[in-house]
Image (cartoon, rainbow, N blue to C red):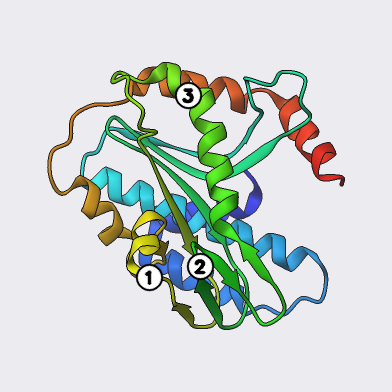
């Protein structure tokens, strides 16, 4: 746990999630001409999602756990240098939520399957999340209780930043990979947990698998080497 997360968790424990949100929102407005600001904003986005989700599963008494910043390799290709990092996972007995966290300043548009456009660039968030889901499934499928052809992994993106968001996609892709903000996160979770669902995942085995991966410090080094920095 880094210092920023520790401070925000301290605020959460004493003043609650709404105050944490206000602090995170104010931090986005801090001016910084160094390259570190983008990393800090991304960190804020992930921490807020974690805390809001922890609050949700606690109040709803959902048996699940959260994994943040999980670096994976493809277990079917042991000699490959490929490494990929998942921002956020919520693992429950019925479903695993695999979420991309994005925090880019200014107004944004979402087109196609999930291409995120800012004033200066665009990102194929859908393809990124699809790679994450496919790689994740290869790593955790042994924890499945129900053996079928479905991944039982939900794709989504959590967007927390200054500026407006215009989602111009058709309804099909909005459903396949929802764009979530702090305003509709709980509604998004409710759509899955409102009604009883059968168990698909062995939650204990899932935790063991992800804990083992998190404990492998070499994966993070290999990921940096794969990205070239």
Residue 140 locus on image (x, y percent): 47, 24
Q: Which secondary structure lies at badge 2?
A: loop
Q: Is residue 45 above or below residue 28?
A: above
Q: Is residue 140 above or below residue 70?
A: above
Whether residue 42 sits left or right of residue 8 in the image: it is right
Q: Earlier in the sequence, mark 3 or mark 1?
A: 3
Whether residue 159 sits left or right of residue 65 in the image: it is right
Question: Disc 2 marks which residue?
Answer: 112
Whether label 3 touches label 1, CB < 8 Å = no
Q: Earlier in the sequence, mark 1 or mark 2?
A: 2
Q: Earlier in the sequence, mark 3 or mark 2?
A: 2
- The residue depicted at 58 percent of the width and 42 percent of the height is 131
- The residue depicted at 36 percent of the width and 28 percent of the height is 149
Question: Disc 3 marks which residue?
Answer: 140
Q: Is residue 222 above or below residue 45?
A: above
Residue 170 has which mark?
A: 1
Residue 198 locus on image (x, y percent): 18, 29
- The residue depicted at 51 percent of the width and 72 percent of the height is 111
């Amino acid at each position: 746990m880094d210092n920023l997360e520790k401070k925000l968790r301290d605020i959460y424990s004493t003043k609650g999630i709404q105050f944490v949100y206000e602090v995170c929102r104010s931090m986005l407005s801090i001016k910084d001409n160094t390259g570190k600001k983008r990393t800090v904003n991304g960190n804020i986005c992930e921490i807020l999602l974690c805390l809001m989700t922890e609050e949700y599963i606690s109040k709803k008494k959902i048996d699940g756990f959260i994994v943040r910043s999980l670096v994976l390799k493809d277990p079917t290709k042991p000699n490959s240098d490929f490494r990929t990092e998942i921002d956020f996972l919520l693992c429950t007995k019925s479903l695993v939520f695999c979420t991309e966290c994005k925090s880019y300043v200014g107004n944004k548009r979402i087109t196609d399957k999930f291409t995120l456009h800012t004033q200066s660039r665009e990102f194929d968030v859908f393809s990124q999340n699809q790679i994450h889901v496919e790689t994740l499934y290869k790593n955790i499928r042994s924890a499945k209780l129900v053996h079928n052809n479905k991944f039982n992994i939900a794709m989504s993106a959590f967007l927390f930043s200054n500026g407006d968001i215009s989602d111009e996609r058709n309804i099909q892709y909005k459903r396949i990979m929802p764009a979530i903000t702090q305003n509709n996160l709980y509604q998004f979770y409710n759509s899955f947990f409102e009604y009883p669902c059968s168990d698909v995942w062995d939650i204990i085995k899932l935790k063991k698998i992800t804990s083992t991966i998190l404990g492998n410090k070499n994966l993070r080094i290999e990921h940096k080497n794969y990205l070239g920095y």
